[in-house]
Image (cartoon, rainbow, N blue to C red):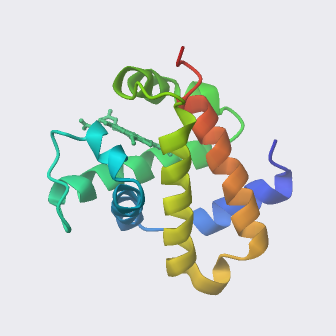
Amino acid sequence: MLSAEEKKLIQSVWAKTQEDFGGEALCRMFVSCPQTKTYFPHFDLSPGSAQVKAHGKKVMNALSTAVKNVDNLSQALSELSNLHAYNLRVDPPCFPLQLLSQSLQVVLAVHLGKDYTPEVHSAFDKFLSAVAAVLSEKYR
Ligand code: HEM
């Protein structure tokens, strides 16, 4: 579980993020693992796509909810967890979730630079693992 100090780090760094980061993270995921594109057959995935940007904002908003409810992720992300269990029938489900987490961490490092300290990186990694665990807990 996250320590009180790690939660503080996550909250303070999250305040420096922007909605655009989500789209960038999605683009990185699509490039680093083209198979992830198969979940979005109905999307225009070309560079600069408005649909990817809009979806990235939704992802960032969901993560904002998670940051605010870090002690109660299961409940806060319950609907999203249902949705992903329905949308993403992947075996094992953690694979693309980890890819998106890694892509987002690269985006954070690129944009936040020095503010993305090793301590923040470590806290964020734990946080995103906890989010991914909730999003995949309804798979069977
Ligand atoms: C939809 C968040 C990981 C595939 C969504 C939505 C959100 C979201 C907020 C929109 C829900 C709505 O419209 O009500 C997240 C978060 C993730 C994550 C926070 C991890 C940190 C992934 C991954 C994939 C994926 C790894 C697949 C590679 C999808 C798909 C949809 C969706 C296909 C439906 C898109 C549409 O048709 O509009 N996700 N997601 N998600 N997500 Fe995720």
Whether residue 16 is visible, yes or no, is no
Observer-nearest of 109 and 5: 109
Residue at the bottom extreme of this rendering:
114
Q: Which residue shows up at 74% across the image and 58% down it?
A: 123
**Does residue 51 show up?**
yes
> Measured along the vertical axis of the image, is residue 1 above or below residue 111?
above
Q: Is residue 110 left or right of residue 10?
A: left
Q: Nearer the viewer, residue 44 or 59?
A: 44
Q: Which residue occupies the extreme top position in the image?
A: 140
Q: Position of residue 28 (x, y in %)?
A: 39, 63
Please tell me in which quarter of the rendered image ligand 1 is found.
Answer: top left
Instruction: Name above or below for residue 48 compared with residue 87.
Output: below
Residue 43 at what x, y percent from top left?
17, 46
Q: Quadrant of the N terminus?
A: top right
Q: Relative to 66, does residue 77 appear above or below in the rendering? A: above
Query: Who's the residue at 67% across and 58% down the image?
Result: 124
Residue 9 image point, x, y percent: 73, 64
Image quadrant containing the C terminus: top right
> Measured from the top left, where is residue 70 in percent x and y?
67, 42
Q: Nearer the viewer, residue 91 or 88?
A: 91
Count up the numbered dots.
Answer: 0
Residue at point 14%, 52% (across, down): 44
**Left or right relative to 73: residue 27:** left
At 36% from the left and 45% from the top, the residue drawn is 36
Q: Quadrant of residue 119?
A: bottom right
